[in-house]
Amino acid sequence: MAQIEIKNLTFFYPDMEKGEYLENPALCNINLEIHRGEFMVICGQTGCGKSTLLRTIKPTICPNGKITGNVLYNGINIKDLKERQQAEKIGFVMQNPDNQIVTDKVWHELAFGLENLGLKSEEIRQKTAEIAEYFELTDLYYLKPDKLSGGQKQLLNLAAVMTMNPEILLLDEPTSQLDPIATEKFVSMLKKINEDLGVTIIMSEHRLSYVLDMADKLVVMNNGKIMEWGNPLEIADKIKNQKISKLMPYATRVYYECGKKGTPPVSIKDGRKWLERELQDKEPPTDRSDRKGDSSKGKFIQENHKQADINKKEMAITCKNLWFRYEKYERDIIKGLYFSVKRGEIFAILGGNGTGKSTTMWLLSGVKKPYRGKIAKKGKVALLPQSVQNLFSRDKVSKELEGCENSLIEEMEIQDILNRHPYDISEGQQQKVALAKILMGNPDILLLDEPTKAIDEVYKEELGNLLRKLSADGKTIIIVSHDLDFCGEYADRCGMFADGKLIAVNNSRDFFTSNNFYTTTVAKMSRSTIKGAVKMEDIVCYLKNV
Amino acid sequence: MHTASIDIYGLMMRGYYFTSMCIIVISIFIFLWSFEKRKPKTREIVTLAVMTALAVVGRLAFFMTPQVKPCAAIIIITGVMLGRQSGFLCGALTAFVSGFFFGQGPWTPWQMIAFGIIGFLSGVLFSKKNIKYAYNKWIISIYGFLATFVIYGFILDTATVFMYTDTPKTETFVATYLSGIGFNLIHAASTFVVLFLISNATIKKLERLKIKYKMFS
Amino acid sequence: MTDEFSRFHPVVNIIFYMVVLIITMFQMQQVMVIISTVCAIIYHIYLKKQKSVKFCIMAFFIFTASAVINPLFSHKGATLLFYMFTGNPVTLESIVYGVFAALVIVAMIFWLSTFNEIMTEDKILALIGAIMPSVALLLTMIFRFVSKFTKKIKEISMTHRALKGEPEGFFNKIKSSLHIFSITITWALENSVDTADSMTARGYGCAKRTNYNNYRIEKRDILLSLWMIILFGVVISRWVAGDLYTYYYPFVRTKGQIMVYVAYILLCVTPMAVNILEGIRWRRLKSKI
Ligand SMILES: Nc1ncnc2c1ncn2[C@@H]1O[C@H](COP(=O)(O)OP(=O)(O)OP(=O)(O)O)[C@@H](O)[C@H]1O
Ligand SMILES: Nc1ncnc2c1ncn2[C@@H]1O[C@H](COP(=O)(O)OP(=O)(O)OP(=O)(O)O)[C@@H](O)[C@H]1O
Ligand SMILES: [Mg+2]
Ligand SMILES: [Mg+2]
């Protein structure tokens, strides 16, 4: 018997204005089965109902709305389960690491669930100590949550749920706010929990590259419906020609882009093996050194043209020897930062958590002033902050976007949500609305602080194209991002932020080929076979020409 | 002249102070205890914590205009929307927690009771059947002005008299209140302004949560 | 922090502060007031080192400001010194009273400042939690939200300034502050829903909640508590028996006993003494190794 069985589930959100339910269901006729110990991944475009689906599996936190159909847990209706059992058996980790933390000490957070169940002090002491050890949180035991990085916070949330020893773990995009290294750590922890403890895991996720190789089942959702579910490899094959295939991991996408058939590679490792097999005893097409002249040899060349164009243009932003700290007696965050960006360029800043990337953006926007050094700017600057909710001050999306051109709204695909409250839309949609609001002022220099977090690959591509279009119109764009693949694809130049300054500023191809760890999936995959490949089309192009 | 039999304990001179402190401590305790016994629901306790924290840190939002302190306004809105008991707790805990960040002093208990009473009273005045008046921003702002000026000003000035002078006399009280008028007026005016400009929107936000999350039902 | 006293069980800490603050607040006998003030200042300097200097200066201003209040209003007392410009008499007794009332305030401020240092939020919560778990949880969450919102307000005001620029003039400043505050309110309320869900998801309210803390009572905690309670008992019993009193009017007259003074000094220096003894013990341990 399946551990969780979902039968004909339909869900309507309430309409706040009319006091009725919305016409379109957020979930429509869902049928699913999950077995004990399985690792299930749910994917789909933003706003397709992943969060809603996960929440219906845990009725105590199901949103207000009209629900029909059943969710069965070991054959009994999950609504008949006692609250206490629900708390013990089903754990839930949400997207935002900060909001889930209730108490103001790490140890207390770990103990919180056990306190609720009314356990004795001795028992709590033992369990929290054990969990802290397992999750490597012992050193942080007495800290305040504010002192933790995003990745540590999310691990703490996972640990706090695991103290209650649940049978099922529901995770709603748990890694969308984390940087690549923290994501890998989190996901490997999940794998350990799944394998060591046999906990059933159901998780929604945009970046399948990190998780798909350990998933037993994949669910693809679209518009509140389940499009496909089952074995990940089979599904990847089935949907390869649809728009939604962009959600698949890079290795898989490259594989199909090259026109291959059959079982695709999923992980980087498989992708590398496949490339090695493919390119065994084949001559490389043409040497890369003669990129300049001939224009028929793939797309690298066009890019170089763009770079050459840009080089002729004027400077949009120049920073000279910037120094900055937040308080007089604190450490310096920015220490001697030099860089310049030309008009029409897309410049990406990469780097670990807490190194000062966002701080740099504040400096560039002019809100914070460096205590030494100079910033020269040409044109109007607009900043998309890291937390886009900071921008929302009205109670309707349409009021938020007053005076915005219709074409922009349509381009962003947000026309359907204009009547909603900015907090009643999914995180990805919030990201879009915020970007539209920023673009409304028609700035010359766009500063985007992590514009790709919480959005899906399909929209990411649209965003990338939008950025290209804007840069072609002469707008300068500076992106801060943890999304290496996105930067590899769309940025003209990249720089690595470390120790308070930008190091290794270079055009993106050279930047990513010279990095070993901080590089795109494609570069990692093809390191041994194709020198200098950074983007998907590089591989496609290369394979066509061999 | 005092009779020696009472004065021996040294309490005569601190008698009013002693009695008032006892009353304050006991009444705060009673409210905390009744909250404890009522077993508050999750969303209620979270909302109360959010409102209290907002009252504590609110003044940071006004760093450009330090004369404006929004604590009393938030406490009043909490009293209106979450009821008198929560109103009292919000007020008392705002003062208590503020002490951790801006310094505890002998005046902390007095602030606790003063803000507590303001919150409690707004819960009583704008109870379920009168709640429609809370939507009128003139009414709620004037209430806020009076509450801050009269209740908060009166209680803290009284505390000054009890703490600093020997035997309270009418003359002393009058002089203290008069000297406090300027400060109290600014405080009351800032409560008025804040309530006038954000009370409606904030009440709507709380209403929204009630519908969206079936809160407090 | 290297303070040993703060490593005792929170119950011990709170007993100390309760007894000392009660005596300080209500005992106006001059020697007792001075003992309390001096001990409070010494302990404060020990705990806060250089930071204490600024505090002392501030306390001095509070002291002078509050010392003049009483003679301004109170004209009791037999020793007339002079007449104010208003025509009211100023007496020696009312000045003395004013000085000691102000000293009481100063002592309280110093004790409470060390209280803030010693009684961390954790300890307060452990104590309250033992009697009232829900209230303790409410307070825990308030503390968490306060630090979270503090950060958020700064962030929102930066975002706002990036979008709209720096406001000029008093009214624009108020307007923009209110705008920032109202964005914070929306953000705080909407995001608190996640917190509530996270609590429910982890079973809040489904059973009778217990309160967990990291503190355990040891023998030395009991001993120190007994020590403080006995000293308190000595002071109170003498006080009640009438061996410790003061009149300010019409003349200042005071009665006290060496025994009471000694007991009170011992009580007030307990935290310091604990620290010094611990220091000696360590040195001995080290020299043995
Ligand atoms: N409170 C609400 N009221 C009305 N509609 C809502 C509410 N919350 C979400 N929706 C809508 O329901 C749909 C599904 O939302 P859901 O949050 O489940 O999406 P999601 O797949 O989790 O998206 P994301 O990947 O961006 O997190 C979306 O179209 C969203 O706009
Ligand atoms: N308002 C502030 N006051 C004091 N310190 C701050 C403030 N904001 C950030 N910091 C500190 O500055 C450092 C850099 O922060 P910043 O937000 O710029 O990092 P980041 O590179 O953007 O990190 P992330 O990838 O997590 O967004 C961090 O150590 C942070 O703790
Ligand atoms: Mg979601
Ligand atoms: Mg950042």
Image: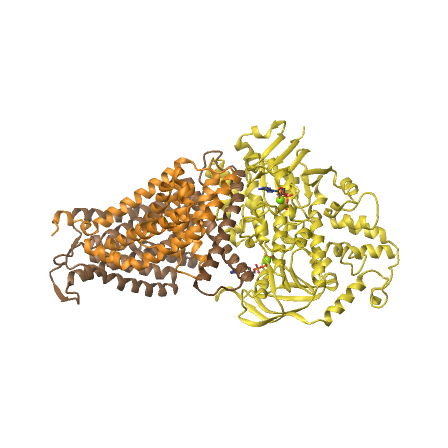
Chain colours: A yellow, B orange, C brown
The N terminus of chain A, quarter of image: top right
Farthest top residue?
A76
Decide which of B171, B135 is in the foreground and name it.
Answer: B135
Question: Which of the 4 image quarters holds residue A358?
Answer: bottom right
Question: x and y percent of residue B91 in the render?
Answer: 38, 47
In which quadrant of this rendering is ligand 1 seen? top right
**Which residue is rendered at x = 51% and y = 55% of the image?**
C152
Question: Which of the 4 image quarters holds residue C209?
Answer: top left
Question: x and y percent of residue C248 in the render?
Answer: 16, 57
The answer to whether residue A123 of the structure is visible from this angle is no
**Which residue is rendered at x = 75% and y = 55% of the image?**
A522
The C terminus of chain A, quarter of image: bottom right
Decide which of A207, C75 is in the foreground and name it.
Answer: C75
Question: x and y percent of residue B173 in the render?
Answer: 22, 54
The answer to whether residue A195 of the structure is visible from this angle is yes
Q: Is residue C81 above or below residue A108?
A: below
Is B114 displayed left or right of A220 in the figure? Answer: left
Decide which of A507, C96 is in the foreground and name it.
Answer: A507
Is A266 displayed left or right of C220 in the figure? Answer: right
Decide which of A138, A185 is in the foreground and name it.
Answer: A185
Question: x and y percent of residue A271 in the render?
Answer: 78, 50
User: How many numbered circles are shown?
Assistant: 0
**Which residue is rendered at x = 11% and y = 60% of the image?**
C78
